[in-house]
Amino acid sequence: MSTDDKNRAVAAAILPLVGGPANISSVAHCMTRLRLGLRDRSLVQEEALRALPSVLGVVEDDTYQIVLGPGTVARVTPAFEALVSEAAVKHTAEDLAAQGAAIKAAQKAKNATPVKLLLRRIANVFVPLIPALIGCGIIAGLNGLLVNLGWLPGITPALAAIASGFMALIAVFVGHNTAKEFGGTPILGGAVASVIVFAGVAKIEVFGRPLSPGQGGVLGALGAAVLAVYVEKWCRRRVPESLDVLVTPTLTVLVSGLVTVFGLMYVAGEVSRAIGDFADWLLANAGAGAGLVLGGLFLPLVMLGLHQALIPIHTTLIEQQGYTVLLPILAMAGAGQVGAAMAVYVRLPRNGSLRRTIRSALLAGLLGVGEPLIYGVSLPLGRPFVTACVGGAFGGGFVGLFSMLGDKVGSTAIGPSGWALFPLLDGNKGLGETVAIYAGGLLVGYAAGFAATYFFGLGKELIEEFNVDTEAAPAPGPETAQPAPEDPEPAAAPAKA
């Protein structure tokens, strides 16, 4: 079977289990998950869906999220969309829109707290940028290696341009996505945000100081585009239709552009600088403690959906310093999770079902995709989720300690974690030293997560309940997993830790 046929087969197996084409209102994907808008979730055959070999887990949120894993989801999604489109021709648009309208409205209101809605929108702005961040980050790392070795001097300038071009214009993409997410015209959001990176702003003085191209970065672009959306909506309500095509875009770009140049760029620039300075100060003066706290709390932040607030911070640090020093620390949460799962494997030798789940999910966990281990192992068992956080805390403390000693470890992109983060590592010392510190942090996280879970994560009652033959007591697996409120990508893959 060809790769295309295999992907189509996976999509064809999933489609009827989520209610068929008529139940699909939207299709999208992030780093690891197929995200579906469903008109009626009661039509989902969740047990059968989880049983599919290609499905690593299911997460129920504002969208129904099917975990397929990195790479796989990017190939299955187009095949899934094609199947839905083929079926759609058999129905009228009115028929599709009429199904479950009340249920769809109720789904949108579910978990719709103001803070979570805002964080979700911010994540939706940045998540589509992650593939470009990863690609450019790896190219930048390769270019740095070639420069250090003195190889291919005729090629390295081209690689530098390729790696840096996207970051030089990232504000434009953020503006475009922000306007789209907040209900405005995407190109107008991009047009306003482009002012931030225009070289000509260096001729403009604000508060007696000339502006710098790029000042304010992604935070300025985010604010500029949100402002553009509000100006555009104001114009749409008041400008006559006959003049709308001329007046609305002009006023949107003009008003938002002036506010951006004479206010937002300066304010966002100061905020961005403060973020960078605080991150440097924190790791230089309290790196071990900060790493302990950040590495230990990241999994609970993911469960609450609050990790999404870190996405613009990561991006700001990458803009300023070329890498984010927070991501390698947060990635230690995944190491603690892997160590905890390995301890469960050892402590419950008779539970064949649970051990099979761990064996099948362990490689994904090592590569930074932790949902199968979290929702199939540690979270259903309870206490191992806490001891996994302990492992993450020790790994984060290890990496943070070296930051205190002057050895920064950073990532040139957000998204991957675990072993998948190695190609994106960068720092203020040599690559070998940076890789060694990160690898040491992973080993500490594995060991601490294993030890904490082995000795404290599985009490006597829990062992008596689950250390039995599968036929006698079914093991907690994906079918008993609790749904997570948010998608960790983004963020960054540590969000999948």
Image (cartoon, rainbow, N blue to C red):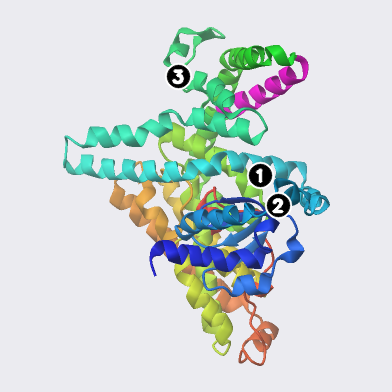
Give how far across and how far down residue 119 sits, in percent: 66, 42
Give the SS element for disc 3: loop
Q: Which mark is residue 213?
A: 3
User: Which of the two labelled residues, at mark 2 and mark 3, occupies the earlier sequence position?
Assistant: 2
Find out whether the residues at labels 2 and 3 contact each other: C-beta distance under 8 Å: no
Disc 1 residue type? Arg
Give how far across and how far down residue 37 sits, in percent: 67, 53
Give how far across and how far down residue 123 sits, in percent: 60, 43
User: Which of the two labelled residues, at mark 2 and mark 1, occupies the earlier sequence position?
Assistant: 2
Residue 67 magenta = no
The answer to whether residue 133 is seen in the rendering is yes
The answer to whether residue 271 is seen in the rendering is no
Per the model, the C-alpha gap separating discs 2 and 1 is: 10 Å
Which range is magenta?
Answer: 220-238
Query: Horizontal placement of 475 versus 144: left or right?
Result: right
Q: Mark 1 points at which residue?
A: 120
In front of the other: label 1 or label 3?
Answer: 1
Q: Is residue 71 above or below residue 465?
A: above
Find out whether the residues at labels 2 and 1 contact each other: C-beta distance under 8 Å: yes
Q: In this view, does 155 lie above or below 421?
A: above
**Residue at horizontal 50 percent and vertical 8 percent from the top:** 204
Q: Mark 2 points at which residue?
A: 62
Per the model, the C-alpha gap separating discs 2 and 3 is: 38 Å
